[in-house]
Amino acid sequence: MSPAVIHHNSSDSTPISCASLSPSQAQVASALAQGHTITAAAHAAGVHRTTVHHWLRHEPAFQAEVVNARSQYFATLGDEMRELTALALKTIRTLLDDPDTPPAIRLKAALAALTRPQVGWGLPELVDSPLDREVVDVSEEIESAAVSRNAPCPCGSGRKYKRCCADRVTAQAAAS
């Protein structure tokens, strides 16, 4: 019997080894790494979501595999973003160099090149914990935005700001 493997979306299609996991655990780890919810990952693997929560809390091999799969998935997405960035910059260069390009398009291409972020177009930082679904960029957006306490939270959770991120933002502001 060959060990179960998770294939991630990469051009080299190197399998992620997970010999100590069941096929269901491997499938759930792969789905979680790709950003699926616990409920969706559990449904796809044919297990209950509480089983997945149990694995995340009490199975060190499963926890490690989710972290490993997620970091490999983010590395793959980072590679794809770098490739797309190079292609986008090449397209902008072509538009700027072509004398037949209308002036309005050339202006927009020039502005796109000038307003490009200094750190590069990329993915948000990978969060350390596999259970923490918040992205670092969202928390920075929440801190900088003036949000009414009864407004929907900018993190996208669907809850009111005062019930979601307000306490964390207040604690971070007090700490700094």
Image (cartoon, rainbow, N blue to C red):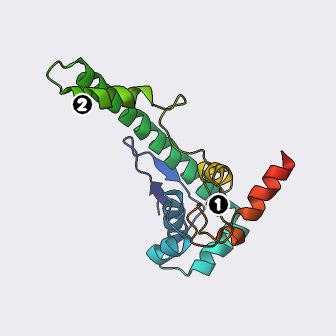
Name the one closer to the observer, 162 or 7.
Answer: 162
Image coordinates of residue 87 in percent, x first then y, are: 32, 31
Image coordinates of residue 2 in percent, x first then y, are: 47, 59
Disc 1 designates what residue?
A: 147
> Does 169 appear above or below 112?
below
Q: How many marks?
A: 2
Q: Secondary structure at mark 1?
A: loop
Name the one closer to the observer, 5 or 103.
Answer: 103
Q: Amino acid at mark 1?
A: Val
Q: Amino acid at mark 2?
A: Ala
Identify the residue at horizontal 47%, vertical 79% (top origin): 46
Q: Secondary structure at mark 2?
A: helix
User: To which quarter of the image does residue 67 belong?
Assistant: bottom right
Q: Mark 2 and mark 1: span between their CA atoms? A: 36 Å
Disc 2 designates what residue?
A: 104
Identify the residue at horizontal 45%, vertical 31% (top origin): 116
Image coordinates of residue 150 in percent, x first then y, are: 65, 72
Give the crowd class for mark 2: few <14, some 14-19, many >=20 residues within 10 Å: few
143 to the left or right of 86: right
CB atoms of marks 2 and 1 within 8 Å: no
Q: Which mark is residue 67?
A: none
Identify the residue at horizontal 47%, vertical 77% (top origin): 43
79 to the left or right of 141: left
Quarter of the figure with the C terminus:
top right
Q: Earlier in the sequence, mark 2 or mark 1?
A: 2
